[in-house]
Image (tube, rainbow, N blue to C red):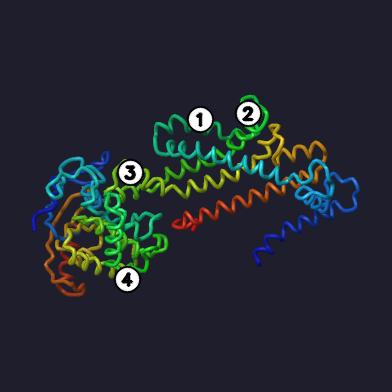
Amino acid sequence: MGEIIHVQDVGKVFGEFHALNGAELRINEGEFICLIGASGCGKSTLLRIIAGFEPASSGYVFVGGREVSGPGPERGMVFQDYGLFPWLSVRDNIGFGPRARGISKAKTRETAAHFIDMVGLSKFADSYPHQLSGGMKQRVAIARVLANDCRVVLMDEPFGALDAMTRERLQDELLEIWARTKLTVIFVTHAIEEAILLADRVVAMAPGPGRIVSDTSITLQRPRDVSSSSFNELRRTLSAQLHT
Amino acid sequence: MRRLVLAGLVPALLMLGWWLGTRGQAYSLIPPPWEVGEAMVDLAIGGINDDAFSKTLLVHLLASAGRVYGAFLLAALCALPLGMLIGRLSLARDLLDPMFQMLRPVPVTAWLPLSMIVFGLGPRSAFFLVALGAFYPILVNTIFGVRSVEPRLFEAAAMLGTKPAAMFLRVVLPASLPGIFTGLRLGLGFAWVVIVVGEMTGVQTGLGAMIMDARQLSRTEIVIDGMIVIGAAGYVSDRIVMALGQRLLRWSPQHG
């Protein structure tokens, strides 16, 4: 398992505002990383720079050894507001990436069916996004990047708009998919508990200027028990780091 | 059934008022409802008055409908590409948008004299005026449609591997279809609204021409029949467009 992402001294300035300063981060293939921090700490900015949506003001991002210069299908993004194409059915949303990359209709249909099945939406394959619940929409968004053969899944507070029950179920499903696919995941959240529950490593960030303040490996056995004493100890440690 | 009764209630009351107001006046300027009905039958199938208007309704209706749909198609052919250009390219916007915004409030009626000078008396002028009426709603809604595509969708398409050159076809066009459709629907409605003005240019047939002729002969019952037929034709035409929209835009919560 080699290194897949290298964030090298990355900074981002919006006018006078330093959104991100000197960010250094190395991520190995198959790791599940959570970026955590208060609003304005630059966690979403860093994610968007890795995705290629924003150019870095300084520094470099390498994914698979190549410098990032724009969005690309090897880095799939899952947005908090889903970003599904409302005019396409679930099936065609999931097939959008393969079709955009010139893969045949028949092959795309096969791929789409496989991932629709993986996220448990077989009954809704021909539904349109406005007919789905928030949790179902996010499942489509996840299936959409998986169906596109991405190597890295970037997730920007993906479960932030969902109710607690749905969020828990999707967290479990995400871990299951991650275990099965061995993908690299960078997951942005502001919930400490969510970060400890999901991540191999929790990267804490702080605002003014946005920067990385700590990088904590979580070695708790999965599935993790949020009420265990070791879990709570981690929660206290991280909480202290975030509030200094 | 309840909706049908409710929809008919106010028109029925208005008819009653009309009937009461014109009853028993031998030389009323406004003809009573039954005279209008009788004239409608004569217009449609003849056999009552046997004058110049008898059995001419279908000819006039077809002439107007042909003009409305033809001019609407021409308007759409011009307004759709222009609207897409103005909506997506800032050069086209700076170049054309101010001009269209200035021309847009000029009513079709005001164009009538100029149109008759440029296109001459007759059907070409009528065609131009009706197309002009349909043009602006399509243009304005197309511009709005292509401009209001959610930026998130461009990001989603880009990260899935869509090339910048393919964005227009794969994202902009489908995303703006509801706006474009609204424009087309309003445009077709406007074409029916301005058909009478369009046919004031000295054309021989058409519902507008029929109304103008009837007015000069003080055949007010035929004027009213013309109004009814335009209303009904515009309504049917709008229903057809709506049904088409509901099929094509099943995915849109506002249309499906």
Task: Report the amino acid beneath label 4.
Answer: Met
- Circle 1: is it few (<14), some (14-19), or many (20+) Cα within 10 Å? few
The mark that comes first in sequence, 2 or 1, is: 1
Closer-to-camera residue (A124/B2): A124
- Marks 4 and 2 sit apart, C-alpha to C-alpha, by 66 Å
Q: Which mark is residue B111?
A: none
Identify residue for label 3. Answer: B166
The lab-note entry on whether marks 4 and 3 share a chain reads no
- The answer to whether mark 2 and mark 1 are in CB contact below 8 A is no
- The answer to whether mark 4 and mark 2 are in CB contact below 8 A is no
Quadrant that contains the C terminus of chain A: bottom left
The mark that comes first in sequence, 3 or 2, is: 2
- Circle 3: is it few (<14), some (14-19), or many (20+) Cα within 10 Å? few
Front of the two marks 1 and 4: 1
Q: Is residue A228 visible?
A: yes
x, y percentage for residue B61?
68, 45
Closer-to-camera residue (B100/A113): A113
Task: Report the amino acid beneath label 2.
Answer: Ser
Identify residue for label 4. Answer: A165
x, y percentage for residue B158?
29, 47
Up-down relation of residue B1 to residue A184 (above or below): below
Residue at mark 2: chain: B
- Marks 3 and 1 sit apart, C-alpha to C-alpha, by 30 Å
- The answer to whether mark 3 and mark 2 are in CB contact below 8 A is no
- Circle 2: is it few (<14), some (14-19), or many (20+) Cα within 10 Å? many
**Callout 1 secondary element:** helix
